[in-house]
Amino acid sequence: MKKYLAIAKAEWLNALQSRGEIFIWLLLETIPIFVMGSLWSSNKSSIPNFSSGQLVTYYIAILITSRLTAYYFDEDLQKEIREGTLSRFLVKPIKFPLANIPQNLGGKAFNTLFLLVPVLAIIISIFKNQLIVPPLHLLSIFILSLVPAFFIQYSISVLVSSVAFYWEQSNSIVHVKWMLEAMVGGYMLPLSLYPSWARLITDFLPFKYVYFVPAAIFSQRLNSSEIILNIFFSILWAVALFFIGDIVWKKGLKEYSSVGS
């Protein structure tokens, strides 16, 4: 346990050094809040079934969800695999890629306390007349929904990283992942605004449980039965992807080791 706490501490210090870059990315993620809030205010009829409060609240929830659950190690890990430098992690007394979890948490602890909270305070002060504050029980369910979302993000990143064991141009898969998260995960636009045929597609993919479901819970867009069903499926996806990712990673690692030998 001590070695994983040391990893988290090291990432905290790394985040401290990279705070300027992190802050810029955080500001970029606030753009949808201002753009969509202004769009609704200027032309309410263009966004049916959404009040301005629900829309602003939805994108604030997206910002929180993204900052607390996202993983970004896949691109760097693919590079380590392609260049043959992954071995330096494999000889250490840590379980890899599980070590990315405490590393991620260490960075998020710093980002949340010193960057996310102040930015949220500014946004809430600007949109205080539009923001819909969820009741305590929904806020608790929202926090609960972030747990499977966190592990879905981790497992997808492991799967994306594992592609590098088999394909040299695997970095393109990272961009495909980002596109899917944005388009079918509800990051760019609430999935409830999609046509019915498109929602059928998103329902069969795990990405909606990363962004849309937590944000829809926070903005009170789901009823009780929908919340229970979506939380259930998000947990199923999290467990299934975790084991699939572990199997694919270990199989790829055997290929990597055989090539190295």
Image: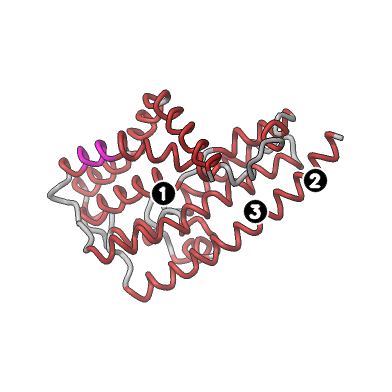
Please name the amino acid that badge 2 sits on.
Lys
Q: CA distance from mark 3 to mark 2?
A: 14 Å
Q: Secondary structure at mark 3?
A: helix
Q: What residue did someone put label 3 on?
A: 245
**Who's the residue at 17% across and 45% down the image?**
127
Camera-nearest residue between 122 and 42: 122
Q: Residue at x 53, y 42 (%)?
A: 4
Q: Earlier in the sequence, mark 2 or mark 1?
A: 1
Say whether disc 1 or disc 3 marks the residue closer to the N-terminus: 1
- Taking the image as shown, residue 192 lies to the left or right of residue 42, namely right
Q: Residues within 10 Å of mark 2 (few under 14, many from 20)?
A: few
Q: Position of residue 123 (x, y in %)?
A: 22, 40
For the stretch drawn in magenta, the main secondary structure is helix
Which region is colored magenta?
117-123
| Numbered badge on residue 254 | 2
Magenta span contains residue 121? yes
Left or right, 243 with reference to 128: right
Labelled disc at residue 187 = 1
